[in-house]
Image (cartoon, rainbow, N blue to C red):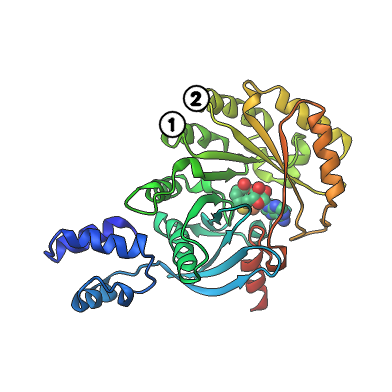
Amino acid sequence: MQFELIKNFVKDKGLPLYRIGQIREAVFVKGISSWQKATALPAALREDLEKNIKILSFTVEVLQASKKDPVFKALLKLEDGRKIETVLMKPGKTWSVCVSSQVGCPLGCAFCATGKMGFARNLTAEEISDQVLFWYQFLLEQKLGERISNVVFMGMGEPLLNYEEVAMAIKDLSNPDYLGIGQRHISVSTSGVADKFFNLAQDLPQVNLALSLHNADDSERSKLMPINKKFNLETIKEKLEEYLARTGREVFIEYTVIEGENNLPMHVRKLGKWINSIKDNYLLHVNLIACNPAVGKAVATEDSSVKKFASALQGMNINVSIRRSMGADISAACGQLASKNRRKK
Ligand code: SAH
Ligand code: SF4
């Protein structure tokens, strides 16, 4: 729900303006999931709100909890019947939400389940920020804690192909009248839609940028991620340098290690060389993650193989971390739940 809706509703109905604050508090502080729970409001107003304003722009179709990790995943049904997924996880001490930015994705990366679904439409800013509001309600109802510390755009879709709505959602989420999640705690992950890096640097310089690289050889990367034909490694480098110079922010290079495909000695060399050729590359940080075999012939990558890749990169003076994949038992990687549900039909 967008905060503007409350303001307009109160003004249109000629209600006293202090109702704006009360409704805001019920939704964004108390995290009510139905208007009936807004007990600070008179019953007639609650009914009026019930008839006119939906707190969330979707319903929950499936909610799954991982048995191994503090990870929850929801399949959401939007008003037009289309489905998206969102994940709540606790990788350390605090909760993070992973949001979708599109229904499906037009970019068709070889390893990605969302890519295999094709593209239906962009999400609205409201549909994006509501995913976070939904998990906020969930945390409070389940008494799992009260705060969502981070939001990452790593669910379904390519956020930089839906730039306007994503930027609006980020502004809403970070608004102190809304959930007040600082922009430094919001990360946008992109497959390399490089012509939008500058917009991000200009409009949202505090937001973290993560680049899904996965291969530093142009012809191999184009096979893995067809977007590379439009924005190749040279273009990405150029736009990245501009971004780094303007923001001075750390950028994360995401690299999913796919056994035998992008972890050979030549891949380490090419990745190291590409990173070392970038101006201000001390701001770059490589995150390695073992491949989650969602689609195709990819096999799960052994931890030892990821460690070997990491130390080879360190040998080239590159900042590198290994990230743990969480919630594999509920297919918490990109696009997997939604595509499984589609297949069942
Ligand atoms: N479209 C954006 C954001 C969504 S994908 C992007 O591509 O960055 C979020 C992350 O999940 C990306 O880093 C993507 O490369 C990764 N991903 C997709 N499928 C995966 C899989 N099967 N195993 C591991 N990571 C995967
Ligand atoms: Fe789209 Fe990202 Fe999946 Fe590629 S990895 S198909 S860009 S969601």
Can you tell which mark lies on residue 202? 1
**For the residue marked with disc 1, what is the amino acid?**
Gln
Residue 148 versus residue 84 in the image, above or below: above
**For the residue marked with disc 2, what is the amino acid?**
Arg
Q: Does the residue labelled 2 lie within 8 Å of ligand 1?
A: no
Relative to residue 72, is residue 322 drawn left or right?
A: right
Residue at x 35%, y 54% (from the top left corner): 178
- Could you tell which of marks 2 and 1 lies nearer the N-terminus? 1
Image quadrant in which the C terminus is located: bottom right
Residue 254 coordinates in the image, percent (x, y): 68, 42
Residue 125 coordinates in the image, percent (x, y): 41, 54
Q: Residues within 10 Å of mark 2 (few under 14, many from 20)?
A: few
Q: Residues within 10 Å of mark 1 (few under 14, many from 20)?
A: few
Residue at x 30%, y 72% (from the top left corner): 38
Residue at x 72%, y 63% (from the top left corner): 328
Residue 189 coordinates in the image, percent (x, y): 58, 45
Which one is nearer the viewer's eye here, 36 or 255? 36
Residue bearing mark 2: 246
Q: Does the residue labelled 1 lie within 8 Å of ligand 1?
A: no
Relative to residue 238, is residue 198 drawn left or right?
A: left
Residue at x 19%, y 63% (from the top left corner): 19
